[in-house]
Image: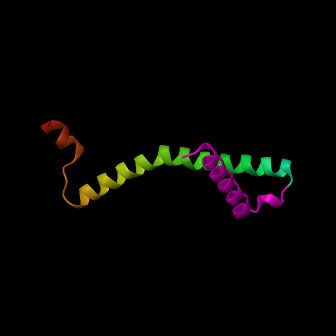
Amino acid sequence: MDVKHIKDYLSWLYYQYLLITCSYVLEPWEQSIFNTLLLTIIAMVIYSSYIFIPIHVRLAVEFFSGIFGGQHESTVALMS
């Protein structure tokens, strides 16, 4: 792709972002506060997902393996 096309595409994406969030009606200082809050919230969601989802998946696997007759961890550890 040409650099100009990439620049046009990114500016189009930014314009879509402004339209979807209605932040084009905000003043520049309000936009910066809004963008900062939005990025902070997104970062917290990503961090929380990274930390807590593996724990819940492990607990769900242990729960369902117990229901469906899987071996307990101590049995698996002794057999290996």
Given residues 3 and 40, the one toward you in this image is 3
The residue depicted at 19 percent of the width and 54 percent of the height is 70
| 57 relative position to 66: left or right | right
Span shown in magenta = 1-26
Residue 77 position in % (x across, y down): 19, 37
Q: Is residue 15 magenta?
A: yes
Quadrant of the rendered image containing residue 67: bottom left
Q: Is residue 37 left or right of residue 6?
A: right
**Does the magenta stretch mainly form a helix, a strand or a loop?**
helix
The residue lying furthest to the left in this view is 79
| Colour mode of the rendering | rainbow
Q: Position of residue 50 (x, y in %)?
A: 48, 44
Q: Closest to the observer: 18 or 64?
A: 18
- Residue 53 image offset from top left, x and y in percent: 44, 50
Q: Nearer the viewer, residue 75 or 26?
A: 26
Residue depicted at 76% across the width and 52% down the height: 34
Residue 22: x and y, percent? 76, 63
10 displayed left or right of 74? right
Check if residue 36 falls in the magenta segment: no
The answer to whether 74 is drawn above or below residue 65 in the figure is above
Q: Is residue 66 above or below residue 76?
A: below
Instruction: Give the total of numbered labels.
Output: 0
